[in-house]
Amino acid sequence: MTSTATPPVRHAGRRSSGRGAASTVVGVVGELLITLGILLGLYVVWQLWWTDVQADRVQAQVLEEMDAPTPDAADVATAVRRDAPPVMEAPALGEVWGTLYVPRWDGKMMPIAEGTDKRSILDQAMAGHYPETVMPGDVGNFSLAGHRQTYGKIFHDVEELQVGDPIVVEAGGVWYVYRVDHMQAVKPDQVEAVAPVPWQPGVEPTERYLTLTTCHPIGLNSLVARFIVNAKLDYWMPVEDGTPPDLVGQTAPAAEGSA
Amino acid sequence: MYGALWRVLPGPAWVRVLILLVLAAAVVLACFEWLFPIVSEYMPFNDPNIQTDAAGAASVEAPR
């Protein structure tokens, strides 16, 4: 029993003195692999959590700075217009110029910026306007891109939209109220989704469309598919006339309105 | 590797632990702010765009 204290000491000494170059290399490689594993885990945390935190912060700041009109149930417009709406001029790339409201997504509101650059626009929880498509209210297909997940995931609930849902754009002092009429998943290279007449490239447009494009499905999806929402302009009204009825859950007057 | 780091650090054990915690925080910060945003450019996730061939969007971003 008295000898039990000494063998471990001797044993440890022998091991450290007999430790060869090979076992040192194996030890270092092992530690490097553990480090790599931790870094990969950290990357997942960053991608799935921190990008949302950062983007939401930027989005809140942008919304505050642009002073976008907020829906007000006490100030709902009594008349809406269905004639040709005013169309603002296309702004410079990168400029934040409007807001997107989707009542179906708990009244979520998002800034719209010019261009679909990932870093500077989409990753900041903003909707990016495809610069080669028309501005809202114009004849043609006003098209927006946004993240389905991470970076604020503004279009996360895109599949919850239903045909007939309003999608509202505010730009240049005008509310444009579009109504969803088609939803579809497509391959990433099916650019006909943002053609002037959606799905009919080359056809001259006569109507005013809006298209949302986002990732599909949720997951590792860039190479798989895109989810497309097409909508058509229902009516418009100046911002100073009040809140569009659809933004506060009311129905717009069906008759041809005039201001 | 980490054993050598532990031996290089000065002071009693609690000081070394403190230094290591600060170092770990610095590494995490560097990753979140600098390394991961760069790495993410090369990751095949999160591209919500239709790959347009017209001048605008396509020139802004290469398909990833």
Image: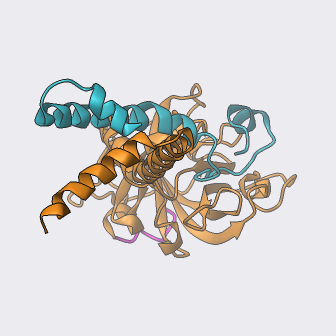
Q: Is residue A224 left or right of residue B5?
A: right
The residue lying at 28 percent from left, 34 percent from top is B6
Report if residue A150 lies within the magenta region: no
The image shows residue A68 at horizontal and vertical percentages of: 33, 40
Q: Quadrant of the N terminus of chain A?
A: bottom left
Q: Quadrant of residue A203?
A: bottom right
The residue closer to the viewer here, A79 or B63, is B63
Give the chain coloured cyan: B
Classify A145 as above or below A167: above
The residue lying at 47 percent from left, 62 percent from top is A156
Residue A86 seen in render? no
Q: Over which residues does the magenta segment extend?
A: A250-257
The residue lying at 28 percent from left, 36 percent from top is B25
The image shows residue A188 at horizontal and vertical percentages of: 73, 57
Colour scheme in use? by chain
Chain A color in figure: orange
The residue closer to the viewer here, A160 or B36, is B36
Q: How many marks?
A: 0
Residue A245 seen in render? yes
Report if residue A252 lies within the magenta region: yes
Q: Quadrant of residue A209?
A: bottom right
The image shows residue A52 at horizontal and vertical percentages of: 38, 49
User: Is most of the magenta stretch helix, strand or loop?
Assistant: loop
The residue lying at 34 percent from left, 70 percent from top is A250
Q: Is residue B61 left or right of residue A174?
A: right
The residue closer to the viewer here, A65 or A196, is A65
The image shows residue A42 at horizontal and vertical percentages of: 41, 49
The residue closer to the viewer here, A140 or B1, is B1
